[in-house]
Image: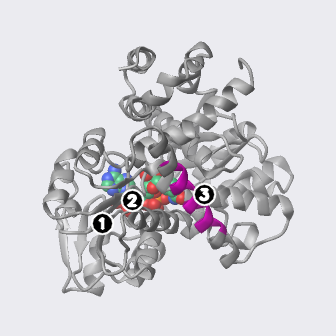
Amino acid sequence: MNSYISRMLDLTQQRNANEPEFCQAVKEVLDSIAPVIDVHSEYEDFAILERMTEPERIVTFRVSWIDDNGKIQVNRGYRIQFSSLIGPYKGGLRFHPSVNQSIMKFLGFEQIFKNALTGLPIGGAKGGSDFDPKGKSDNEVMRFCQSFMTELYRHIGQDVDVPAGDIGVGAREVGYLFGQYKRIKNAYEGGVLTGKDICYGGSLARKEATGYGLLYYMREMLAASGQTLDGKIVTISGSGNVAIYACEKAYKFGAKVVAMSDSNGCIYDENGIDLDAIKQIKEVERGRIKDYLKFHPEAQYIEKTGEDSPIWTIKTDIALPCATQNELTLNSAKILKENGVIAVGEGANMPCTLEAIDFFVNNGIPLAPAKAANAGGVATSAIEMSQNSMRYYYTFEEVESKLEQIMINIFNSCKDAADMYGCSGNYVKGANIAAFRKLADAMIAQGIV
Ligand code: NDP
């Protein structure tokens, strides 16, 4: 292995020993870019990897709020401003009890590369809190969001850092966050948050963008090996924003989605998942996937009992992990292969373990990597920012056609980079190399900062 990369892998491990997710994300990138480092010794002279793996700034803060019983609650807030190389810091906020610094840093690191692939002027960031919105009343969520923003506002701005949603942060949370920001700043800075509701400055097609974008990428990847989505069986983990709109687009492309999940288990409906029922359960009632049986008693519910999600034991042509990190293990990858999977598309961030990725790649199963395949969300967020700046809005069709073109461009960048560096068909390496080259050159151009 290249000596610079091997030294950097050791250093990352030493300096971030208690951050396994962050070390995993860095390892995936560093393992991929060896052929670039081999022919660009100047990257070592300019300490590109040392700088690229260290966030520009980490902010952590206390979030105190009062629950409906009048009891004081305290959570921890984060904002990792990882890189402003090619634009204002940009990346979502996650509210989930599992949130910690390692998860925030891995997501922020991934975001730099993803945002570079979009071709749009956005840097990389991530933030959130260990607050769990599940089971909280609207008023509790509002009080939490207001307290969170009362600290966060001093670190963000439409030309500084632009947060958006992620797990546990949807239109409701973004609305409460925006309202508090506006109140504190006494200014209507529409572009300070994305994922806003349409009625006060959001973009049409933003809600759909990550899931739709994933399917556009999958369409291009399948086409590269002469296949289409038409008639394919698809399983999608999760039943949140990304999963729902991935399902919607899969149907539009003629595929049949037979299973979806949440953190408790999955449903299997051999007739094809009834997406209206899922939307009613998840977007309106904020219920559990098991509630699907109330709509379709003939479907099957499989409870999650061990570490691996039961959804990956279901026979499928195309697997789309759209829930969370490390949800698809080597064990699940092997079962998917035995069952004849022909392609995998990462809708969530880092949903496949490193071992699962290697297994798919080594067995010739095309894998659409998260930082490329789910970039449609942040790309459309950037389109939302530009609409806010113009004070003018595009139609749904206009935004979607820009999204489609961006996803085609991203796929082509991954493919071209893989071809150029001798790893054709390995889109994981292709994505990392294409993004890395752009960022490394920008870093050299901007001097030692
Ligand atoms: P949502 O909160 O809307 O949905 C998350 C879904 O994943 C839920 O069904 C949830 O189930 C499930 N889930 C969450 N945590 C776990 C877990 N630990 N184990 C099993 N299932 C889990 O989030 P999004 O759909 O927005 O995000 C999903 C993924 O996509 C994340 O990795 C996110 O970072 C990524 N992503 C999102 C983008 C966006 O635009 N929203 C953009 C790019 C990437 P439950 O309800 O039981 O918790």
Picture quadrant where residue 100 is located: top left
Query: Residue under circle 3?
Result: 142
Observer-side mark, 2 or 1, equals 1
Q: Are marks 2 and 3 in contact (CB under 8 Å)?
A: no
Compared to residue 306, the image places residue 376 above or below, namely below
Q: Seen in the image, is 245 located left or right of residue 183?
A: left
Badge 1 amino acid? Ile
Compared to residue 277, the image places residue 5 above or below, namely above
Query: Residue under circle 2?
Result: 322
Q: Tag 1, which secondary structure?
A: strand
Q: Residues within 10 Å of mark 1 (few under 14, many from 20)?
A: many
The residue sitting at 46% across, 36% down in the picture is: 106
Residue stretch in magenta: 402-414
Compared to residue 385, the image places residue 207 above or below, namely below
Q: Seen in the image, is 364 located left or right of residue 167?
A: left
Badge 3 amino acid? Met
Mark nearer the N terminus (2 vs 3): 3
Compared to residue 106, the image places residue 207 above or below, namely below
Q: Tag 3, which secondary structure?
A: helix
Q: Does residue 403 show up magenta in the picture?
A: yes
Residue 385 position within the rendered picture, expressed as x and y whole percent measured from the top left: 74, 57
Badge 2 amino acid? Cys
Ligand 1 lies under 8 Å from the Cβ of mark 2: yes
